[in-house]
């Protein structure tokens, strides 16, 4: 039964399967895969363990669904972003979308870090299979920008993409803690992150 607050707001609760995926992503990101139990995920959503297992037959199946949902987001998003005008416009659209995706739920960034540290072979294979066509295309765009004189000639395209992604993920995953060191809010750190990524890529005309 839906809560009175849900009914009053006129919004429907997401389906149980969606709520389970969201909860699993959050707990896997906060605690790690091994430390997160099926029961804890079910409890966080307010369903029985058997109800969870109806949608996902095992913790591994749920974990795979969480990762695939994230990769599916980018399989859908990359073609739209690549349709932007060339140069700085495409860069701004891409970086803004990536930062927003992780900032909307920092547990996505925490989960990404944990996957790279705890399950590197599996995540490497998934990224290579599902997203490498888009990263190759982005690297080609960087080379085109170098040829046209708007991107620094000493940039290594593939290495730049890896470093940019790692900076975004690590900044968002640890941003609130790091910001406390100097008393700034996370938006200031996001702005500085984007500025640094831009200046390390484009040739300034000033």
Image: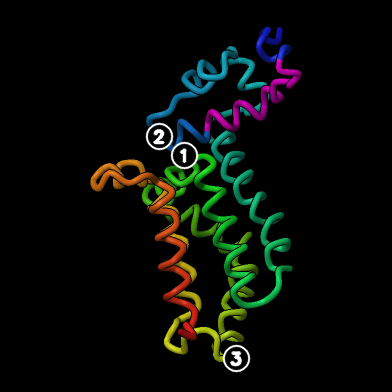
Around disc 2, counting alpha carbons within 10 Å, would you say few (fewer than 14), some (14 to 19), or many (20 or more)? Answer: some
* 167 lies above or below 148: above
Q: Main secondary structure of the magenta part?
A: helix
Label ID, residue 30: 2
**Quadrant of the image containing the C terminus:** bottom left
Q: Are marks 1 and 2 in contact (CB under 8 Å)?
A: yes
Which quadrant of the view contains residue 15? top right
Q: Is residue 158 magenta?
A: no
Q: Secondary structure at mark 2?
A: helix
User: Marks 1 and 2, how far apart in space?
Assistant: 7 Å
Q: Earlier in the sequence, mark 1 or mark 2?
A: 2
**Quadrant of the image containing the N terminus:** top right
Q: Are marks 2 and 3 in contact (CB under 8 Å)?
A: no
Which residues are the magenta region?
A: 9-24
Label ID, residue 107: 1
Around disc 3, counting alpha carbons within 10 Å, would you say few (fewer than 14), some (14 to 19), or many (20 or more)? Answer: few
Q: Are marks 3 and 1 in contact (CB under 8 Å)?
A: no
Label 3 sits on residue? 148
Q: Earlier in the sequence, mark 3 or mark 1?
A: 1
* 120 lies above or below 203: above
Residue 198 % position (x, y)? 47, 71
Residue in the image at 23% along x and 45% along y: 181
Q: Decide if residue 119 is in sight here.
A: no
Label ID, residue 69: none
């Amino acid at each position: 039964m839906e809560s009175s607050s849900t009914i009053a707001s006129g919004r429907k609760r997401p389906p149980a399967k969606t709520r389970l995926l969201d909860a699993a992503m959050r707990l896997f990101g906060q605690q790690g895969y091994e430390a997160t139990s099926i029961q804890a995920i079910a409890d966080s959503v307010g369903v029985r363990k058997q109800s969870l297992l109806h949608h996902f037959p095992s913790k591994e199946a749920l974990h795979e669904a969480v990762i695939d949902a994230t990769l599916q987001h980018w399989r859908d998003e990359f073609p739209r972003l690549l349709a932007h005008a060339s140069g700085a416009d495409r860069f701004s659209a891409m970086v803004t979308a990536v930062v927003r995706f992780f900032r909307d739920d920092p547990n996505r960034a925490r989960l990404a870090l944990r996957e790279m540290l705890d399950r590197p072979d599996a995540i490497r294979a998934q990224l290579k299979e599902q997203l490498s066509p888009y990263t190759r295309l982005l690297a080609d765009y960087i080379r085109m920008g170098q040829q046209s004189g708007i991107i620094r000639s000493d940039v290594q395209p593939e290495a730049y993409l890896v470093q940019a992604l790692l900076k975004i993920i690590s900044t968002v995953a640890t941003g609130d803690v790091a910001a406390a060191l100097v008393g700034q809010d996370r938006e200031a750190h996001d702005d500085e992150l984007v500025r640094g990524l831009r200046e390390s890529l484009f040739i300034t005309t000033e």
